[in-house]
Amino acid sequence: MEEPAYPNWRKGIGAGLIGGTLVAIIAFLGCAWVASWPAVTEVSVSLSFRPWWRWSNWALSIWSFVFSTVGIGLIAACRPDVGRKGR
């Protein structure tokens, strides 16, 4: 049986896209959640995320998607398949 070639880019791209999407969703939901906090003072952190559909919130989600997709994808592509050995 042939040993698979590493890095396994197909596995890396799949894992990176799934992981990056989850991280981007969590980042955007975090921005929307912080925007819902009441503004106690004129310099509250919640005011920097209001309104929740603001471009800076989308940009934060996009950048978190890009960086986490690359990181998770590289780790998954270079990791050997230890579960596929004959037991």
Image: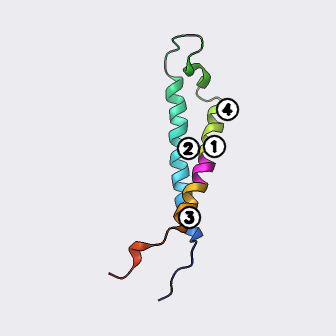
On the image, numbered disc 1 is attached to which residue?
62
Relative to 43, say whether 70 is above or below: below
The residue drawn where x is 47% and y is 89% is 1
Mark 1: amino acid: Ile
On the image, numbered disc 3 is attached to which residue?
12
Task: Provide the secondary structure element on which disc 4 rests.
Answer: helix
Locate residue 27: give its quadrant: top right
Residue 37, x across and y down, in percent: 49, 20
Q: CA distance from mark 4 to mark 3?
A: 29 Å
Q: CA distance from mark 1 to mark 4?
A: 10 Å
On the image, numbered disc 2 is attached to which residue?
24
The residue drawn where x is 50% and y is 40% is 26
The residue range painted magenta reads 65-69
Task: Provide the secondary structure element on which disc 2 rests.
Answer: helix
Residue 71, x across and y down, in percent: 58, 55
Badge 3, how many Cα within 10 Å: few under 14, some, many 20+?
A: many
Residue 48, x across and y down, in percent: 61, 23
Relative to 55, say whether 83 is above or below: below
